[in-house]
Structures are given as structure tokens and as C-alpha cells.
Amino acid sequence: MFKVITIPFDRSKGGFDEEVLNRFVLNKHVKSHRAEFFQDAQGSYWTVFLEYDPALEKPSARETEGLDDSQKLLLERLRAWRKERADRDGIPVYIIATNKELAGLVREAPATLEALKEVKGFGKGKVSKYGQDLIGLIRAFFEKT
């Protein structure tokens, strides 16, 4: 997705009000950006071009329903791993796994790749690409807690 935001120079503040930009990117994963400064008869402006992916929201109460505190912590660790991996691969997080799929991982806690294939949303492709990482994270979590 793309967005162009133009921010006028605010004489009363003596600068540009970046709050509009900050609010917009708060729940987005910015893939690339480009800023250009320009002036016209009315004033000075920064125009920012953003390429972004929408960020997934926090897991819903329904997705975390029935999870104990330990399981919720594992869910947050899996979400953090997913974000790091998606950033590294340059893809949206939901390509790796949705919140619902991660909650399913937490509930099932698969210990093997074969068991991971039984979790809804984890077919052969996801298992071959992310399976070792996921199984390792789950095993390490339960060894430490």
C-alpha cells in the first residue's frame, strides 16, 4: 500500500508538525519512504511518500481465550519472532502466520515438524520454511518456564 503525506511548515511552532506522520505510521510496517521538500507562494512543505503494509493488531480476546499467563507469554514471543522474520524477509507478518495461527501453535505446542503440520494453517510450505525455528522456540520456551 502507498500513502503520500504533505506537512506544511508551521510558523507558530517554528517547524514541521510531524505528529500527522507519526500517527499514520504507528500501526504500519513501513517498507520504504522518500521525503521531498518544496516551496510555493503559500509556504514550505515536506511531502513524504510511504510504501507500507498494515500491521496486524493484537490478538483478539477470542484468540487468547483459555490461554494461561505462560501461554500468553509464549504467544508474545512468537509474535516478536514473526515480526523479526517478516522484516528480514521483507514480507508482511501475516504471510508467516496470522494471530489465530500463532494462538493455535500455543494451544497445540507441537514438539515435532510432523505435529506442526497438524496445526491449522501450517501446511508443507510453512513447515519447511519456518518449522525448525518455530519448534525450537516452543521447545526453548517450555524448557525455561
Image (cartoon, rainbow, N blue to C red):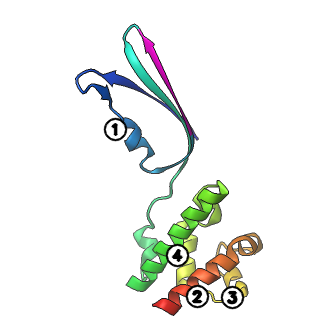
Could you give the CA–CA distance between mark 1 and mark 4, rounded to whole angstroms? 34 Å
- Quadrant the C terminus occupies: bottom left
**Is residue 36 a member of the stretch shown in magenta?**
yes
Kind of element beneath mark 3: loop
Q: Residue furthest left?
A: 12
- The image quadrant of residue 15 is top left
Which of the two labelled residues, at mark 1 and mark 4, occupies the earlier sequence position? 1
Which of the two labelled residues, at mark 3 and mark 1, occupies the earlier sequence position? 1
Three-letter amino acid code of the residue under disc 1: Glu
Which of the two labelled residues, at mark 4 and mark 2, occupies the earlier sequence position? 4
Give residue 97's position: percent from left, percent from top. Answer: 61, 67
Three-letter amino acid code of the residue under disc 2: Arg
Give residue 50's position: percent from left, percent from top. Answer: 54, 37
Q: In the picture provided, is 96 more to the left or to the right than 7?
A: right
From the viewer's perspective, is the residue at label 2 or at label 3 nearer? 2
Where 32 sits versus 83, above or below? Answer: above
Kind of element beneath mark 2: helix
User: At x 67% / y 82%, what residue is drawn?
Assistant: 116
For disc 4, the marked residue is: 103
Which of the two labelled residues, at mark 2 and mark 3, occupies the earlier sequence position? 3
Label 4 crowd (10 A; few <14 / some 14-19 / many >=20): many
User: At x 71% / y 84%, what residue is drawn?
Assistant: 113
Residue 19, labelled with which disc?
A: 1
